[in-house]
Image (cartoon, helix red, strand yellow):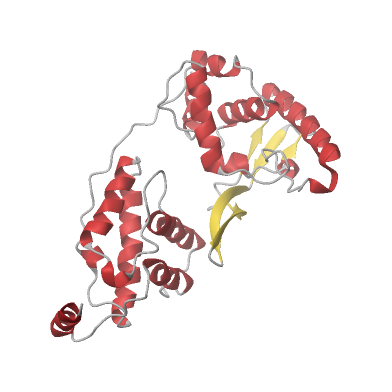
Amino acid sequence: LLDQLRDEYRKSGTVGRRDVTIRQVVDDFLNHPPSRVRSDITRQVNRDAAIRICDGTRGVRGLGSTPIARLTVGDVERVLHGLARASYSARALSQSRSVLRRAIRRAERNGQVSRNVADLAELPAAVTRKSKALTEAQVRALLALKLSPWWRAFIVTAVMTGLRPGELLGLRWEDVDFGAGVIRVRVSLKRVRVNGDYELQLRELKTDRSKRTMTMAAPVRGVLTVLRRGQAADRLRLGEHYQDHGLVFCGPEGKPRHNQGVRDHYRRLCVRAGIGTDWQLRETRHTFISQLSD
């Protein structure tokens, strides 16, 4: 170790601390972003990239607990290749490496590390997957399953409105106007890191154009009415244990649902319906567009 420290000092003129972790330098970057980072959208993109790098996701082990002095190019490339195998886009891979590079660059400036190994890490080729849409027969197969009122309402609303998964999970009853027969899309449910922990929060949509008001088709009205009655029964049954967040597609106790859990169960429903395994939850939006086109 002494020889390594001497070699590090000879090459860089400094010796980095050995107890600083990747999570610490990434958190420092997120909490004190460069002055040019002003957009809430950019900050959220950086936070999402930090989650992938530090915590890992979809079976990929993150780098958060790794001491920055011991981080190698191979460590960084292992995570990037894991994200590529987990079907993350080329843009997501680039954003993940970018956040890590900039965080380590700041640590390098502060004398916490002697070189930026993320600069040397190469991006793997991302797996490209063309989005597709469910056919009318496949939608019927899904709805022919013995579904809970929650899932029947979720699928029908998704394919007949084209709302994104985060918009569906963030939909509030106050945004559903049964009298006017419309659904107002104003917010989306996001996973946000707060004081070192992650929590689900409703966030305003990125642009005014994203905020929209949609006509509520009769089938959507029907399944949402059934769902609302079921929630009212849950509220009475659970009493003070029910946490009312005003969400349409909430959990059994009223709390927000995690996107990942919904995505995983949706794939299992697709398997049960006999329509295959290679379906993404967001493709209900493509299904809506395809049905309009037909």
Q: What residue do we see at 18% from left, 80% from top?
A: 8
Residue 163 lies in what quarter of the image?
Answer: top right
Q: Is residue 203 visible?
A: yes
Nearest the viewer among 208 and 226 is 226
Nearest the viewer among 142 and 40 is 142
Residue 119 relative to residue 56: left or right = left
Q: What residue do we see at 40% from left, 68% from top?
A: 26
Q: What residue do we see at 35% from left, 56% from top?
A: 95
Q: Is residue 164 visible?
A: no
Nearest the viewer among 12 and 279 is 12
Residue 68 lies in what quarter of the image?
Answer: bottom left
Residue 67 relative to residue 153: left or right = left
Expressed as whole percent of the image width and height from the top left, the position of residue 181 reads 74, 31
Expressed as whole percent of the image width and height from the top left, the position of residue 283 reads 47, 31
Residue 204 relative to residue 138: left or right = right
Expressed as whole percent of the image width and height from the top left, the position of residue 278 reads 40, 27
Q: Is residue 167 above or below residue 94?
A: above
Residue 104 lies in what quarter of the image?
Answer: bottom left
Q: Residue furthest bottom?
A: 13
Residue 119 relative to residue 215: left or right = left
Expressed as whole percent of the image width and height from the top left, the position of residue 51 reads 44, 56
Q: Is residue 169 above or below residue 200?
A: above
Q: Is residue 238 above or below residue 53?
A: above
Q: Is residue 1 above or below residue 151?
A: below
Nearest the viewer among 151 and 294 is 151
